[in-house]
Amino acid sequence: MATAPKPQTDSKATTKEVLLRVEGVTKIYDGTVKAVDDVSLTVNKGEIFGLLGGSGCGKSTLLRMMAGFEKPTKGKIFLDNQDITDLPSYQRPINMMFQSYALFPHLSVWENVAFGLKRDNMPKDEIAKRVEAMLTLAQLNKYAQRKPHQLSGGQQQRVALARSLAKRPKLLLLDEPLGALDKKLRETTQLELVNIIEEVGVTCVLVTHDQEEAMTMASRIAVMSEGYFLQVGEPDVIYETPNSRQVADFIGNVNMFEGEVVVDEPDHIIVKCDECTHYVGHGFTGNKGMAVGVALRPEKIMLSKERPTGEYNWAEGVVTEIVYFGDHTTYHLKTTNGHVIKAQEINNTRDLSCGLTWGDHAYMHWNDLAMIVLTH
Amino acid sequence: MTKLARFSQSLTSGKLIVIGVPMAWFLLLVAIPLLIIMKISLSEMEATSVSKMISWTNGLPTLKLNFSNYQFIFSDALYVKTYISSIKYALITTLICLGIGYPFAYFMARAPKHIQPTLLMLIMLPFWTSFLLRIYAWKTLLVSNGVINNLLMSLHVINAPLDMMNNSFSLTIGMVYSYLPFMILPLYANLSKLDLRYLEAAADLGTSPFKAFWLITVPLSKAGIIAGSMLVFIPAVGEYVIPELLGGPSTLMIGRVLWDEFFSNNDWPMAAAVAVVMIALILVPMAILNRAEAKLEEA
């Protein structure tokens, strides 16, 4: 039948120059625990590639194999078309910014940044020049002689970045780079970090469990679970066209409706669910009678007290919960069959816009391109 | 001083008891006896009690201090030689203990977690037997017709027994053997806490494992090295039993001189002076080292 708008995951990427290629990498611990399961990926030059997943999904193991701290049980890793699978970490032109930084506590900021350069037997004056440049880049000149424990979290994070960039690695690995910072600092540091990375022009692989961090920093994201990739794509593609219930559920908030395709036309389909009937304004790969999930993000639902006209794309419910976030409010509405649907309203005036309160009966409606039909 | 004042202000009565009891113990059994020894060292042989050291002239007490013991120590070449020899043996012992103990502690800290308690137990095991017995056992191993010589002779590796007893060799072996656990334990405690991510970070920045050991592991275990070295060096300087049993007459150690002065010559003021100089020889460099260390930390 008709096909859904295909997410253009790798079509743009293939035209670019590939820096890192991971081919069928598997990591098994203690003979039984599969941490990474037959993963393949390519990272292009100049790109920030995000590995996103919950704890224990294998993202850190994958990163550690790129750094050379772990050997893959199976598969190969190529950097610039050179097989680096068996190269020890100290011979790889790859540097890593460690989770909680791992700055050498007995060395000053200056010595930490110079550490990698000294190992390359670089001339002294050149080391000094490079370290100064790095400290300037990370705005750390004032703190050059301090020890790591005398710095704030944000400053330590910048030292870690300066140290990992000092050797001008081909590939920079970032392991939860902002995990140790508080929320406010994280937002500003995120931008700083991206600016510095772009200024240097280094290719990055970023590991994070924080979807916001992945969305804002990475140019492409791989969503990982139980050792394999659920989906790889640009942040907006992952968010707006997840390829499975799992991805839709992992990234952001989502309302899932389970139903059956009752009309299947090239330009639209109709899915009958318990609470409502969805009119989806595009075709899909599947057929009539198929059981599907319809994912609908809360911010795409509008609320009103009046019953919408037409028979599709609306539902009704009773307000059971109002969660105020300042910039927006999330309303939880319980339908007659007990399903709770979340709707997010932007607070664009100073009085709460739609005037709903607990126990109110309200209608939710959405347009026919707001939802994603998921077959698995 | 202000730091001390702030510290004492922060003490509640509970804390005061916890800190106070061991402090009182220390004062009673270390500080006061030490003061008594210092007092004795400044008196004459026949007049070691305080009352005899004070003479009354015109109703005013004058303290009669006798520095002749100290003068004698520094003018007599034998004492000076013995001090130097003691420090030499203590230093050699410390260095050998460090050389053997560091790799030992290192691999113990890196051993699988479940066998570490067993390894630790093995190090403690010798303490289950009397120290004196263990030193005496070395004698039976090292003497001319001892276990080692008999074995080597019967295997025809040597024709005449090796001279291993009553010399600096037997003394050093005995000292290293006895003090090795005191080096290993603080080093192990330190090395097992080392964050392995530092080594990963070093490798990541292009450091080979061998270089990373010298650039990261050793500097970060400095506190353990210092603690272990002090635990070995300080008692080794004043060691008496080991040189007495294994050292023979040729090895000079200040502990034996002390014993002779106290119990053979019965010259308590002289013996006390020898002891005070020994303590000063150890304490003054340690205090300077400590201060430098503290300053370095603050900077």
Image (cartoon, coloured by chain):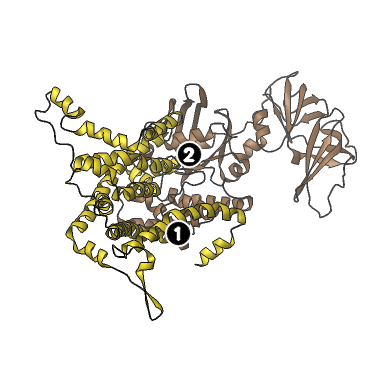
Point out the residue furthest to the top here. Answer: A289
Instruction: Give the residue number, with chain letter if any, for mark 1.
Output: A146
The tag earlier along the polypeptide, 1 or 2, is: 2
Q: Are marks 1 and 2 on the same chain?
A: yes
**Image location of residue A314, percent across then percent down:** 83, 34
Q: Which chain is yellow?
A: B
* Residue type, label 1: Arg
Question: On what subunit does the disc labeled 1 rest?
Answer: A
Nearest the viewer among A291 and B62 is B62
Position of A140 relative to B238 (above/below): below
Foreground disc of the pair 1, 2: 1
Viewer-closest of A3 and B274: B274
On the image, the x and y values in percent for residue B34 come to: 38, 58
**Residue at mark 2: chain:** A
Real-space Cα separation, disc 1 to disc 2, in angstroms? 37 Å
Question: Badge 1: few (under 14), some or many (20 or more) residues near its Cα, within 10 Å?
Answer: some
Find chain A in the image and tell me its colour. brown
Is residue B96 at all visible to an observer of this figure? yes
Camera-nearest residue between B11 and B265: B265
Residue holding disc 2: A44
Of the pair A288 and A296, the residue shown nearer to us = A296
Whole-percent x, y for residue A351 in the image = 84, 53
- Name the residue: 47% across, 21% down: A31
Q: Is residue A243 left or right of residue A150?
A: right
